[in-house]
Image (cartoon, helix red, strand yellow):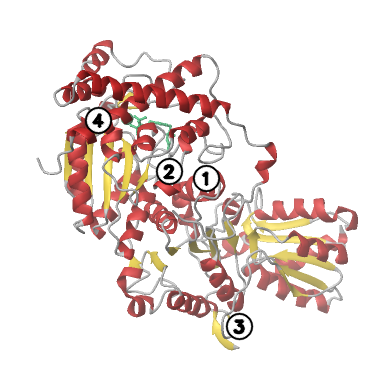
Amino acid sequence: MRNAPSAEDIARMYRQMLVVRAVEEQLAVLHRQGKTRGPIHTCIGQEAAGIGATAPLEREDVVTSTHRGHAHFVGKGLDLRRVLAEIFGRVTGYCRGRGGHMLVASAADGLLGGNGIVGGGIPIALGQAFGFQLDGSRRVAVAIFGDGAAQEGTCHEAMNVAGLWKLPMVFFCEHNLYGLTVHARYQSSVPDLHVRAAGYGMPGVMVDGNDLLAVHGAMRDALDRARRGDGPTFVEAKTYRMTGFSTSDMGGYQPEEEMREWAARDPIARTRALLATMLDESSLEAVERAAAEEVEAAFAQAMADPFPDAAELDAPEYAVAEARP
Amino acid sequence: MTRMRYAEALNRALHEEMARDERVCVIGEDVGIYGGVFKVTKGLRERFGDLRVRDTPISEQAMTGLAIGAAMVGRRPVLEIMYIDFLTLCLDQLVNQASIVHYIWAGQASLPFVLRTQGGAGAGAAAQHSKSLDALVAHVPGLKVVAPATPADASGLLVAAIRDPNPVVFLEHKLLYNTTGEVPEGDHVVPIGQAHVAREGTDITIVASSKMTLDALAAAETLAAEGIDAEVVDLRTLRPLDRETIARSVRKTNRALVVNEGWTTGGFGAELSAVIMEDAFDWLDGPVRRLGTADRPIPYSLPLEQAAVPDAAAITRAARLTLAG
Ligand SMILES: Cc1ncc(C[n+]2csc(CCOP(=O)(O)OP(=O)(O)O)c2C)c(N)n1
Ligand SMILES: [Mg+2]
């Protein structure tokens, strides 16, 4: 297979997936203990999609993420301690605690940024891709969004313009079957969203979003195409969130049988099984231990970090000089 | 000094800034081949090419996001939104995206883009093409809002807006495009955030912006014939507001009339009135009076439209009432 990742690459992505899972499980625990503020959206069950979409990117490539972005942050190489510090409102966070978990952004890493408005980041990625096209650079802008966001006007407008102008962009749709509590069958005119790409002059591909290598491969192809100047690609990753919509979800709308079916396709178990054909058990356990230790240390540090002083509210309303990623 | 029309002054500023800084690009509906429906972008595409001057699809949300994304990666887009009435389609991108980036990301990125649009009644364009929505955008921290009244200010403020590292909403007025005035030669920049006293007087301060400034100046001539010496403060920038110039004037004249072409209730006049109470209450000899457009959708038929929107005669009457109060 062209561009097939090595065992090391897969192990690195496996470790990132484990980090995301451990972070989110710990956040859920802390939420129950009242130690978090505001809703937190986890991507448990979707890690292969989120990591597979972001790990193949170069540092200069940029991503607009969503309200469910923890995997994107990790895949794009952000410092876990600073991500967690942002989630806990600490001054050491990427946004000095001003953003919170939905609005993490790291300009230096090209994570521009999380978004609490469904579909809000898609036209921004379009503009980033437009900027790259004007620059004549080989950078690519990736808009990551959900199946719910795909129903927003922003998505359709941006797909049209990207296809029309052949912008270096990837539309990466994490289709997890739900938009908040409502199943896609009640939201979407078509079950498979990639078919819409044809109407906007770009290729659409569908992959098993719980298959790390499938996602990674589709993303690599889309990135190559964008860098060649051939324009955008729509990648639809079919996946499932194995938990509620957010920490405040009261449940009751995901059928048990559906949950069971998808649990059997847990992307972490699948990636482990794949790696077990390449690495011995002790190497696998070493990866797992390293991930657990990284997460533990990051939580300990982030939760010990200071809050911003209330006087920081008065930080300037406007930029006085240009700052850019 | 060269005498030119308001639209020509804007056009000259765009030509000069595009020539001076290759990061500047112009996007919008009909801005390229046709040169803009108000001819403000005339000749740009011929001179700078269709990469930097782009006719876009009729997709205001995506285009606003496009400007944000391109600015984020180092371009300086100038986006034309044909009518301010269509700003409602841009509001999510302006209010939930553009306005938050600098502050919430703690200075990691700046957004140097300009959203040019035009509003105002008087052209028989009816309810969806005649509004003044200044208050809508001036309400939002992180945005700058300018509304020039003269060709010189139109050109100098547009240059300042293009060079500013923040999102600037640039409000033009459809009835001003054909007005003429002297415009300085050379690198003419009018700083954002500075009001100016368009006419000195001692008896009453009339605070206005955009076309209302011209109407206030005409009203001042009528009032002068009656022995009333009015001072006219032309705001030029609505956000950040030059409170000092307003207060200095009111402390001198002890009477204040605020005029804004937007709807009266919850309009920008309400803000001006509150600012005068806060900054100059002890100097007032009577209540602040505000004048705005009638609280109705702007009707089409000439007598109805004229009755709805303030003009020089209405300002004259309101000034007399202010002095009687
Ligand atoms: C414009 C907008 N509408 C509604 C919401 C409330 N909301 C937040 S997430 C969400 C569901 C989004 O579904 P999808 O895009 O599929 O993302 P997922 O949560 O499944 O990852 C909704 C309705 C919002 N935040 N923004
Ligand atoms: Mg979804």
**In the rendered image, the vertical position of residue A303 relative to residue A157, given as above or below:** above
**Residue at image coords 34%, 58%:** B58
**In the rendered image, the vertical position of residue A112 relative to residue B152, given as above or below:** above
* Residue at the limit of the structure toward the bottom, as seen here: B2
Distance Cα–Cα, label 4 vs label 3 = 69 Å
Residue in the foreground of this view, choosing between B141 and A302? A302
Callout 1 and callout 4 share a chain? no
**Is residue A118 visible to the viewer in this orientation of the structure?**
yes
Q: Quadrant of ligand 1?
A: top left
Say which chain tag 4 marks: A
- Which image quarter is the N terminus of chain B in? bottom right
Distance Cα–Cα, label 3 vs label 1 = 42 Å
In the rendered structure, the answer to whether residue B186 lies left or right of residue B48 reads right
- Judged from the image, the secondary structure of the residue bearing numbered disc 4 is helix
Distance Cα–Cα, label 4 vs label 2 = 26 Å
Distance Cα–Cα, label 2 vs label 3 = 45 Å
Q: Closer to us: mark 4 or mark 2?
A: 4
Q: Is mark 3 within 8 Å of ligand 1?
A: no
Q: Closer to us: mark 2 or mark 3?
A: 2
**Residue at image coords 44%, 58%:** B71
Residue in the foreground of this view, choosing between A16 and B69? A16
Q: Which residue is mark 1?
A: B105
Asked whether the beta carbons under mark 1 and mark 2 sit within 8 Å of each other, the answer is: yes
Q: Which mark is residue A113?
A: 2
Q: Which residue is mark 3?
A: B181
Q: Which residue is mark 4?
A: A11
The amino acid at mark 2 is Gly
The amino acid at mark 1 is Trp
Comes first in the chain, label 3 or label 1: 1
Place residue B148 in its image quadrant: bottom right
